Amino acid sequence: MKIKEDCLSPILIGLKTCVAELFSDFGYFVELTKQTRDKGIDIIAIRRSIIPEIDERYLIQYKRHAPHNKVGISVVHELLGVGVSEPHTGLIIATTSSFTKPALEITKKESTKWRLHLKDYFDIYQWLKAYTKKRIW
């Protein structure tokens, strides 16, 4: 996937394509899913390992929300449900806002802490900083 410079704009970090661009920059092969029948998955990110058959496949759901509109537990449960039927190494919910306390608490459970990752506005901001740091001469 070609890296797009417009991802650097804070206004545009709400676009799932920018999150896909960031994962591409992190070394993943990225596929944007179609809007229909995507089961809530917006991005599939795959990274091939040098160790045979130890590849990574992340299912990423992107939520563009206003800062006051936190992502709740129902979204987390929905993604965990999709994860039962779709092959993956891990599940990621990335948002332009933040997460409710119940949503964050589920990531601490032994059954989910190794496969569920919640990334908020500040995480995405850090990804963007790392991305731009590579491009500053």
Image (cartoon, rainbow, N blue to C red):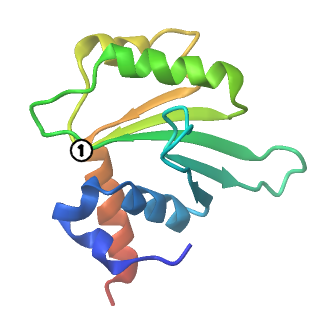
Look at mark 1 in the image and give the residue it sits on: 96
**Residue found farthest to the right:** 52
> Residue 73: image x %, image y %?
34, 14
| Residue at x 32%, y 62% (from the top left corner) | 128
Q: Along the horizontal axis of the image, is 129 left or right of 32?
A: left
Q: Along the horizontal axis of the image, is 24 left or right of 120?
A: right
Q: Count how many numbered circles sit on residues in the image.
A: 1
Q: Would you place residue 93 above or below residue 7 in this image?
A: above
| Residue at x 58%, y 10% (from the top left corner) | 111
> Residue 52: image x %, image y %?
90, 50
Q: In which quarter of the image is residue 83?
A: top right
> Residue 54: image x %, image y %?
81, 44
Quadrant containing the N terminus is bottom right
Q: In which quarter of the image is residue 70?
A: top left
Q: Is residue 27 visible?
A: yes
User: Could you say which is closer to the camera, residue 119 or residue 37?
Assistant: 37
**Residue found farthest to the left:** 68
Which secondary structure, mark 1? loop
> Residue 82: image x %, image y %?
59, 24
